[in-house]
């Protein structure tokens, strides 16, 4: 009898196909995810930005990395939602009673999250370009930025999978989105941390979102990235690893 | 047992302190239709989940197609399909895409051909390219069952396959189930409808308070019915009456 293992990539391919269809048939989720960051971007650049001192010549250039992270944080709620729906509707049980690679359905969700967030991020960058965003960064720097954003997405995705798997109700599944939404607001996303009161400032400067932001800024505007990028990477990998372990444990317990 | 597809012995299962299965025994013969009968909450779905490798039992053994469900779940999955109590279909995909997805996951060589055949057989050809979200309840169920037949599994589990169907839909599903057994598949189905078990099953088992309290052919079960002797009016007991009589007697003890 043939074994299950050697079909992993075939099964993943099928799951990816399913994901892509889901994404392209629910384009409204991309709009829902991007509309708020775009509104914030417009508000801050055209209304509030004039009064904010960032030490850069264009406030939009300063703001964009934060907007990108907010966009990803926004998209993350849908990971829990899709996960919960699959579990609820029984399609997971069907998959798990079939001779397929056991974790393929779970990885399918991870891929979906990566692809849909990549689309949202592209939409935001496009809008920013229209608004006048410019970056001197070369291909390598852009690749590094893409890598950081992908890592940030993965870390949040694995966190979001946990309530998607364990929640008993729909509201329970989506609750994780709220604290994640807040993090970019208490960071250097909108204003430099120097102006904040010392307690808030200590938090803001050391939380991963700020470190990721500063690394992305450095990459986009050709400044030396320094140590921040390694600490930022360590944060992302650390969060991802812990969330992955808990998510896998919840997944194995469910099935 | 060469002639049995499913063997269950002393099966136990609790959820926290709710003791649902208290030692369940039965066997299902190859190529037969076996109906597991029980009221709401009796533990039918729990048994189905254990047999389809979705849930671990606490005690006892269960073998499907000769493989122990706990020790060799991968092998069990090669020979079974599950139609759960609630339709397990992807609402965003079309009916055709759902079937192709399953055919590819079953690693079939000709997924498109298999899909066309099943769509045809289940009367879903016209709706094949519509999103499943637009299907009626009956169409959902038909697609759900069609998805379970992809790859012609040897042993088919159907958990309350006709719940929520109108009478016509039920008769249609009954016909299908009989066809499956005629083609050599073993069918394990659960139901709350006594007439369904009566119509379809070669053997019927009644699950009550964690145990199988009766198991046999319809004729066997009819013998258990006490009052056929008093006959002013010619009347065969229906399975419903037998069920109520057995359950009632158990509860008096
Ligand atoms: N995951 C669970 N956690 C706790 N209790 C559960 C769980 N699943 C089932 N139960 C309980 O176990 C009992 C048996 O459930 P099961 O679903 O097997 O019954 P059933 O015979 O399929 O009922 P129905 O006809 O309503 O589908 C019920 O009392 C149910 O509430
Ligand atoms: Mg049930």
Image (cartoon, coloured by chain):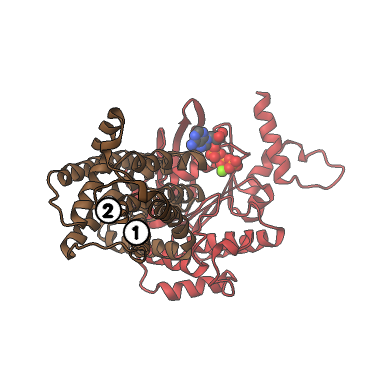
Residue A175: image x %, image y %?
45, 39
Q: Which of the 4 quarters of the picture holds residue B132? A: bottom right
Q: Is residue B210 above or below residue A134?
A: above
Say whether residue A26 is left or right of residue B220: left
Chain A on-screen colour: brown
* CA distance for labels 1 and 2: 9 Å
Say whether residue B194 is left or right of residue B212: right
Residue on which the image places disc 1: A121
Callout 1: chain: A
Q: Quick one: B57 or B137, which is closer to the camera? A: B137
Q: Quick one: B36 or A21, which is closer to the camera? A: A21
Q: Residue furthest front?
A: A51
Residue A161: image x %, image y %?
37, 45
**Residue at the image position 49 percent from the left and 38 percent from the top:** A168
Q: Residue furthest right?
A: B232
Q: Secondary structure at mark 1?
A: helix
Residue on which the image places disc 2: A149
Q: Secondary structure at mark 2?
A: helix
Q: Which chain is red?
A: B
């Amino acid at each position: 009898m043939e074994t299950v293992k050697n079909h992993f990539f075939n099964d993943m391919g099928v799951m990816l196909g399913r994901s892509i269809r889901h994404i392209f048939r629910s384009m409204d989720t991309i709009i829902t995810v991007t509309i708020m960051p775009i509104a914030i971007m417009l508000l801050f650049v055209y209304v509030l930005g004039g009064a904010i001192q960032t030490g850069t010549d264009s406030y939009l250039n300063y703001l964009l990395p934060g907007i990108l992270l907010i966009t990803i944080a926004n998209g993350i709620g849908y990971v829990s939602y899709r996960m919960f729906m699959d579990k609820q509707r029984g399609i997971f049980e069907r998959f798990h009673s079939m001779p397929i690679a056991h974790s393929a359905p779970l990885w399918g969700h991870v891929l979906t999250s990566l692809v849909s967030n990549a689309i949202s991020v592209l939409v935001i960058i496009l809008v920013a370009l229209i608004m006048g965003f410019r970056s001197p960064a070369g291909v390598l720097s852009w690749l590094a930025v893409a890598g950081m954003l992908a890592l940030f997405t993965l870390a949040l995705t694995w966190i979001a999978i946990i309530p998607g798997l364990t929640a008993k109700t729909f509201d329970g599944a989506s609750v994780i989105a709220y604290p994640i939404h807040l993090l970019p607001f208490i960071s250097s996303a909108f204003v430099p941390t120097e102006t904040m009161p010392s307690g808030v400032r200590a938090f803001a400067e050391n939380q991963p979102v700020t470190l990721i932001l500063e690394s992305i800024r450095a990459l986009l505007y050709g400044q030396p990235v320094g140590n921040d990028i390694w600490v930022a990477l360590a944060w992302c990998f650390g969060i991802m690893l812990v969330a992955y372990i808990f998510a896998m444990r919840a997944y194995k317990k469910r099935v | 047992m060469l002639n049995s597809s499913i063997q269950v012995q002393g099966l136990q299962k609790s959820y926290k302190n709710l003791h649902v299965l208290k030692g369940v025994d039965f066997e299902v013969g190859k190529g037969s239709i076996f109906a597991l009968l029980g009221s709401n909450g009796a533990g039918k779905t729990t048994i189905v989940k254990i047999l389809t490798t979705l849930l671990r039992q606490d005690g006892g053994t269960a073998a499907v197609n000769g493989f122990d469900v706990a020790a060799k779940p991968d092998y069990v999955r090669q020979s079974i399909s599950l139609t759960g109590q609630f339709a397990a279909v992807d609402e965003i995909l079309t009916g055709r895409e759902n079937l192709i997805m399953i055919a590819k996951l079953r690693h079939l060589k000709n997924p498109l051909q298999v899909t066309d055949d099943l769509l045809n057989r289940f009367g879903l050809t016209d709706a094949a390219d519509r999103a499943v979200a637009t299907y009626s309840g009956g169409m959902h169920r038909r697609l759900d069952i069609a998805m379970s037949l992809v790859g012609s599994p040897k042993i088919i589990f159907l958990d309350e396959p006709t719940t929520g169907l109108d009478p016509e839909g039920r008769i249609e599903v009954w016909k299908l189930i009989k066809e499956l057994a005629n083609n050599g598949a073993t069918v394990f189905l659960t139901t709350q409808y006594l007439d369904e078990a009566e119509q379809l099953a070669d053997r019927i088992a009644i699950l009550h308070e964690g145990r199988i309290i009766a198991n046999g052919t319809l004729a066997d079960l009819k013998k258990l019915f006490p009052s056929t002797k008093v006959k002013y009016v010619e009347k065969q007991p229906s399975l419903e009456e037998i069920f109520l009589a057995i359950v009632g007697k158990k509860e008096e003890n």
